[in-house]
Image (tube, coloured by chain):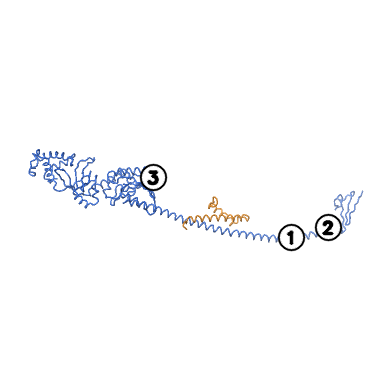
Chain colours: A orange, B blue
Amino acid sequence: MKEKKFKYDDALIELKQILQDIQSDQTGIDQLSSQIARSKELINLCKTRLREIESSINPDE
Amino acid sequence: MGNFAIGNLAIQQFHSSAVLQFSSFAVSQFSSFAIQQFRSFAVQQFRLIDYFGKNFKSLESSSLFELNEYIRKVFALNFPEPIWINCEISQIKEVRGNFYLDLVEQNEKEEVVAQASGVIWYKSFLFIKSKLGELAASLLQAGTHVKIKVNVDFNERYGYKLVIEDIDPTYTMGRLELARQKIIERLKSEGVWGLNKLVDMPTVVQKIALISSDKAAGYADFKTHLEQNGYGYRYQVDLFVASMQGQNTERDVCSAIDQINEQKGKYDCIVIIRGGGSKLDLSSFDNFNIGYKISTSRLPVITGIGHEIDESIADMTAYEALKTPTACAAMFIDKSIDFEAKILDIFQVIQTFGRLNVEKNMAFLEYAEKTLAQRPLEILQRNKNDLAVMNEMIQAHVGFKFKSASDFLTQASKIVELMDPQKVLQKGYAIITQDGKTITRIPEFQQDKTTYIRFFDGEVITNNN
């Protein structure tokens, strides 16, 4: 919610793509740094969203 | 009848005279009729004088009292013991513990074919009440068909009267049951029997149209029980006032059902409630039209008419019949509880699956995070290694190239040195040129042209002209 129109599923797809690229050596060294930055951002957003969902699932915890 | 010693013919005549009306108001007509009757048969068949000490032929000169006294004696003689009769109570009123009744018999066209006054003295009523309990009050109502044990009484002043000593409730019950069976058959033949049981009952009932008497204890029971539920459920109860016993019940209940069904979507169901009472009080609900209205109601009908042994037509045609108003209220509360429990169950399943999903996603994120932290380092490391290898290779290659180049250069410089024209000229060679061209062969030499001869130490120009 913090980012405009942040969608978990879209973020996940992007993250998986980055992961796949990095694992299969498709990422060029030039893109590596930006990819890592992007993936960190995505992971943080996703985790935040999950924690929000988690706390809404367990309202009294 | 055969045992009647006297006047039995007269009694038979009374029975067969359809239009005869016996009542305290009609004593005079009855009396004059009786006189005629008695005259005719007395003269022909009986020696009345033996019994009454008076010749009936001289009755014309008798007083009214004498006549009535005579009739009383005829009654007394012919009805030495009480007899059982069947009839319908058309009216009844209580005065100081005594009950005064109008008893009638109707034919199939519902025309009154016989009528008589009846009374239950207080003492008899106490006996009947102790024998039948609450049922007594139910039986002693206008419209009830009863089998009663009566003393056929004639009083000189008050006329003909049936003094009721006992009531047989089984007769009334049997009649009701018979009537009920007929109603059931008729509802079945009209194809509406059981229709209300097929109507959809909402999972949760909150908007209730209540048909009851506002004074009925059952109404208060129902409302209190609903309102005081311990779960905080709210119910909307709209009362449609109707008579719950007696002859207005049919009209009131039917019009209330119509009225409620016309208000589409306003109510979830109809509840018909009455506060207890004996079986007979409830006979108003053994009614064809009520059964028909309930059967064909769009909304499900719940009855809490309040009896324990038998079901009325209303109960049988209803979506569900419960014993008491409180049971109706409890059923609605139970439905709400069931629904809430189901929702909570579903929520728990959602919660569990939601939690699992979050955990799964979290695990993936952790994995991605870890992988993304390690993998680039590996890539960088490998690239570094690659660079190092390439560097080595380049170094090695450069060394080799450099050597071969320097070797070549050494050799080349040697060759160059050897080939230096100055050095060749020093060795005694000379270079001949004509027109700027070096002459290396005889044919190229032209006698008539200026010739330049370059020696080690200078140039000579020859001109053959």
Cβ–Cβ under 8 Å for marks 2 and 3: no
What is the distance, in whole Å, between disc 1 and disc 2 at their CAs?
26 Å
Rendered image quadrant of residue B87: top left
Residue type, label 3: Lys
**Disc 1 packing (10 Å; few <14; some 14–19; many ≥20):** few
In primary-sequence order, the first of circles 1 and 2 is 1
In primary-sequence order, the first of circles 1 and 3 is 3
What is the distance, in whole Å, between disc 2 and disc 3 at their CAs?
124 Å
* Chain of the residue on which disc 3 is drawn: B
Residue type, label 1: Phe
Q: Secondary structure at mark 3?
A: loop
Between A38 and B405, which is closer to the camera in this rendering?
Answer: A38
Residue B402 - label: 1
- Kindly identify which residue carries mark 2: B420
**Disc 2 packing (10 Å; few <14; some 14–19; many ≥20):** few
> Image point 83% across, 57% down: which residue?
B420
* Chain of the residue on which disc 2 is drawn: B
The x and y percentages for residue B225 are: 35, 52
- Kindly identify which residue carries mark 3: B266
In the image, residue B386 above or below residue B148:
below
